[in-house]
Image (tube, rainbow, N blue to C red):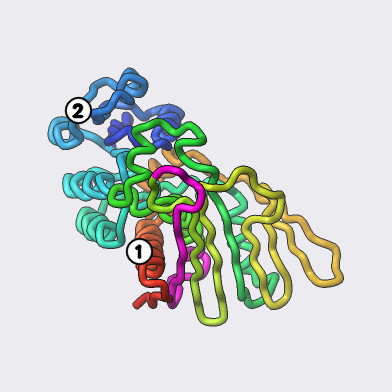
Amino acid sequence: MSDTIRIGVAGLTHGHVGGLIASWEKVPNAKLVAVADNTPLMEHHGPKFQRRYQSWREMLDVEELDALVVTSNNLESSEIAVEALGKGIPCMVEKPMAASYADAQRMLEAWRKAQKPLMINWPLAWSPWLHELKRLLDQGLIGKVFHLRFRNGHHGPKEIGCDPWFVAWLYDEKLNGAGALADFCGYGAVLCRWYFGLPQSVYAVRDNYTKDYEVPDDHAIVVLRYPKLTCILEGTWATFGFDRSANPVVHGKEGTFGVYGNDVVLFRAGQEEVHHESPALSIDNPAEYFLRCMQTGHCPGGILHPEVAADACKIIDAAKESARAGKEVPLA
């Protein structure tokens, strides 16, 4: 690999794209070579790149890229990644992995064949508490875990000011995969997959509870069932303001962990609570981390791993099926 890392970006309609571009701008030897998009968002982001394209296919045909950032809608992003990996280009795909488990499987197949890095960038991965909680659970400090609950979201993409091109595909079930169910329950799904593996079954309910316009769902609850363990995931585009309770919360046979900001607090019956301040990550820049994977050949770890992210898609697909059928759906 040459000293200069040539970076391309495919798609500008994912609302997280600005943060990822900024993360590469912090890497001294990275050069923003090319960007492809056919929306007015190019007017804002385009000047940061040497060359601009209307078509990501043309960009991949013309440019020699060392890495590709994939930030289109969830359906097209999987198509872009498969094509790029087929050309031997490492891919950083913004969360989630795909709009469906079938598309995630196609990405896994392309990744295994290409033997090039594929990272699914979940912003949650850069939260120190996620890793500290995992470390403390692995130490067995609260004994056998029997329950986890995790809630996240906001009061709606349009309402919080997301640009209209992002909103357009977030509200399209085919392009997004669902509504708040895909957007925010996905975080809980990938967290639980990393912590506990795949569940035995999934049960979910979702609906448009608060919007006076059409969305696939603005609030969803998903129950994951493991042997002697349940996880409740809640994703919302309907909540105005959150309380100050711990999130997530993990209950074990010998105690409870609650996450408050960046602190993981241990509670035991009749004992004083113990605060564990989550240490800073050794690398907290997704671009720098991905570049390290490219240079060392190591696969991205934790929830960034493509197999973990693909299983999160499998969980969300099962949740959609459960909500449609009104019953628990087993995961084979």
Mark 2 Cα within 10 Å, few/some/many (few <14, many 20+)? some
Residue 168: horizontal and vertical position, in percent?
A: 34, 38
Circle 1 or circle 2, nearest the eye: 1
Location of residue 317 in the rendering, given as x and y in whole percent from the top left corner? 35, 63
Please state the extent of the stretch shown in magenta in the rendering: 192-213
| Residue 4, image x, y percentages | 32, 29
- Res 274 quadrant in image: bottom right
Residue at 50%, 53% in the rendered image? 209
Return the x and y of residue 127 as percentages of the image width and height: 57, 47
- Is residue 211 in the magenta section? yes
Q: Is residue 273 visible?
A: yes
- What residue is shown at x 32% (from left), y 19% (from top)? 43
| Residue 290 against residue 307 in the figure, above or below | above
Gap between marks 1 and 2 measured at Cα: 32 Å
Residue 313 falls inside the magenta stretch:
no
At 56% across and 76% down in the image, what residue appears? 229
Taking the image as shown, residue 11 lies to the left or right of residue 286, namely: left
Q: Is residue 225 above or below residue 260?
A: below
165 left or right of 60? right
Residues at badges 1 and 2 in contact (C-beta under 8 Å)?
no
Residue 27 seen in the current view = no
The disc placed on residue 317 is 1
Instruction: Quarter of the image for the C terminus: give it.
Output: bottom left
Front residue of this view, candidates 319 and 15:
319
Amino acid carrying label 1: it is Asp
- Splitting the image into 4 quarters, where does residue 321 fall? bottom left
Going 62% across and 74% down the picture, which residue do you hit?
145
Q: 262 and 103: which one is in front? A: 103
Name above or below for residue 67 compared with residue 107: above
Q: Which mark is residue 54?
A: 2
